[in-house]
Image (spheres, helix red, strand yellow):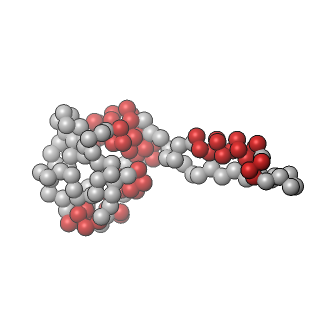
Amino acid sequence: MRPLFLFARLPRGESLAHSKGAVFALALLAALPAHAAGSAEAGKEYFTATCMVCHSAEPTDDGGAQGPVLYGLIGRTAGKGDPKFKYTKAIKASNVVWNAATLDKFLTNPPAMIYGTAMAEIVASKADRDNIIAYFTSLKK
């Protein structure tokens, strides 16, 4: 989602602080989400169907053991968080902190963002990426 910018021409002599339209526009902007929200439910469905072959996202989901556990991923530094998994040197050296923006970029094309990663699966659909991110965001460690 692109940022929304509103421009208004104020009548001569009227300041922004005194404009009812400007106050309404600012209130409207404050109510808008900062990131296009996905569906955590749809993200969990996608994760279960596609990602659980390699990953686990919840303590009881019995996901695959080929990749790291992704429970508590949001806010975590890449290459940390799963003591049982041997992360690649590239992931450990990346110093990436996982958030909506970094996950979106990584899931779009993992090797392009972190050359040398073992993660090869691309999530081509922006809607699917938003849903996965919403799912990870909903998981609290």
Q: Is residue 130 left or right of residue 34?
A: left
Q: Nearer the viewer, residue 125 or 113?
A: 113
Q: Is residue 50 left or right of residue 9?
A: left
Placement of 111 over or under 56, stated as above or below: below
> In x, y percent, where is residue 98?
34, 54
Q: Tell me where residue 39 sits by quadrant.
A: top left
Q: Is residue 129 left or right of residue 54?
A: right
Instruction: Give the residue at x 43% y 44%.
Output: 130
Q: Nearer the viewer, residue 24 or 134?
A: 24
Placement of 88 over or under 17, stated as above or below: below
Task: Determine if residue 23 is in view.
Answer: yes
What residue occupies the far left of the structure in this picture? 84
Instruction: Give the residue at x 33% y 35%.
Output: 44
Instruction: Give the residue at x 38% y 35%.
Output: 40
Q: Nearer the viewer, residue 39 or 66?
A: 39
Q: Tell me where residue 42 sits by quadrant.
A: top left
> In x, y percent, where is residue 116?
25, 65
Tell me how many marks there are: 0
Instruction: Give the residue at x 66% y 52%.
Output: 5
Q: Tell me where residue 32 sits by quadrant.
A: top right
Task: Determine if residue 47 is in view.
Answer: no
What residue occupies the far front of the structure in this picture? 18
> In x, y percent, where is residue 26?
66, 46
> In x, y percent, where is residue 18?
77, 48
Quadrant (top left, top right, bottom left, bottom right) of the C terminus: top left
Q: Is residue 124 left or right of residue 89?
A: right
